[in-house]
Amino acid sequence: MDFEIRTIREEEFEQWVKAGSLGFGSHATDEHVALNKSLSEADRTFGAFDGSRIVGTTTTRPLAITIPGGSAKLGYVDEVAVIPTHRRRGILTRMMRSQLDQMRERGEPMAALGASESLIYERFGFGIATWSSKWKIDRRHTSFKFPPQCGGHLDFIDKDAAREEWPKLYARLAGDRPGMVHFNAAYWAGSLRGSEGLGPGTSDFFHVAYIRGERVSGLVSYRIRDGAVLAIFLLGEDSEVEAELWRYCFGIDLMTAIEGFNRPTDDPLLWRLEDSRRLERSTGDQLWLRLIDVEAALESRSYDTDGELTLGVHDSFCEWNDGVYTLEAGPDGAVVSRNGSSPDIDLTAAELAAAYLGGVSFDTLARAGRVQARSAEALDLADRMFRTPRAPWTLEM
């Protein structure tokens, strides 16, 4: 069948949201329609049309992302769905084609998304760039071996204050770690809404601020369910503030367990606990990255050590990227040129995206059979150049 892929008109937003919800196996509420309209721009929002009906959805949120040494423009892909009656007809591929082409036209050097299914996006050149951990701990085992010392105090704030303070705190801290997407205020308003979709017995948010001096230095927004504290968002200006917020969560009366969602893989809390084994942890993929313009992306970031490296990049979906790149780079920046040299490292666009923020080493990818290297020395140089002091992490999507 011949489906039309195009950006939607303003009057088609409601139909677009309802089609996306149907693709995810749910029904769109009026709140969900209003939320998506506040987050989406019509000229960045694509629909697949079967006649006048929308049967596939995707949207690009023009944001930015922290990369080593600074930030870069980002096309964040969201609300990707095809309704069940129209799957396996090439609709997703055609929507992704239109979406990535538009990003290229608008000078966005990379795209990112959170994948609901892990088998879909690698064929479009996305690689897993950040990982996150989920925690759970019995309240009886939450004592600290190294208690925090901050000199501030805790206080509840209401939902309106939380919607005001979260964007300000996050904006101050988003540049501290690669992988942090620079979300806007509309995103925070949507993320801090009520308990819709979280199942029976889940409370609305509670918001607690850690105040040091005269400003909010940390925030935790949590819910309560079945005797457990669900710490959905927790962020502080430093590890001491974050430890104070965890200590608060650990001490809430009548609770039996505390769960942490989407924590950095190198979070120091594990090393503060008296009995670290009691912290149950599982790790999963978080942000999938796609380099739309390999040359621009490589030149945008800084590198941990000086070096020259030639990369052979294979990209069947964004064919303009396919080629050999010589990267001359260091802590002060990078220069990239395209040439016909024999590559030191040969890899696909998806593998390069996975390694771009420092979330996986080239050596690990080589041992997995995903990249080929001319020598062990080339792998070592690549890892020293691309490494980052802190593990890349994305707070939330």
Image: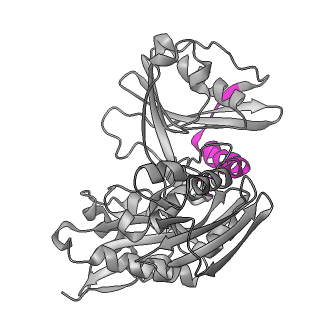
At horizontal 82% and vertical 35% (from top left) the residue drawn is: 214
Q: How is the image coloured?
A: one colour
Q: Quadrant of residue 152?
A: top right
Q: Position of residue 154 (x, y in %)?
A: 68, 26
Q: Quadrant of residue 182?
A: bottom right
At horizontal 51% and vertical 83% (from top left) the residue drawn is: 320
Q: Main secondary structure of the magenta part?
A: helix
Which is nearer the eye, 361 or 216?
Answer: 361
For residue 322, above or below residue 189: below
Is residue 220 a member of the stretch shown in magenta? no
Is residue 164 a member of the stretch shown in magenta? yes
Which is nearer the eye, 93 or 324?
Answer: 324
Q: Position of residue 335 (x, y in %)?
A: 73, 72
Give the quadrant of the N terminus. bottom left
Q: Position of residue 223 (x, y in %)?
A: 46, 33
Of all residues, the one furthest to the front in this rendering is 375
For residue 295, above or below residue 128: below
Residue 42 seen from this side: no
Q: In the image, is 157 to the left or to the right of 56?
A: right
For residue 302, above or below residue 145: below
Residue 320 seen from this side: yes
Q: Position of residue 79 (x, y in %)?
A: 39, 64
Q: In the image, is 325 to the left or to the right of 132?
A: right
For residue 64, above or below residue 2: above
At horizontal 29% and vertical 69% (from top left) the residue drawn is: 19
At horizontal 62% and vertical 80% (from top left) the residue drawn is: 338
Which is nearer the eye, 92 or 305?
Answer: 305
Q: Which residues are magenta?
A: 154-182
Q: In the image, is 226 to the left or to the right of 182?
A: left
Q: Quadrant of residue 94?
A: bottom left
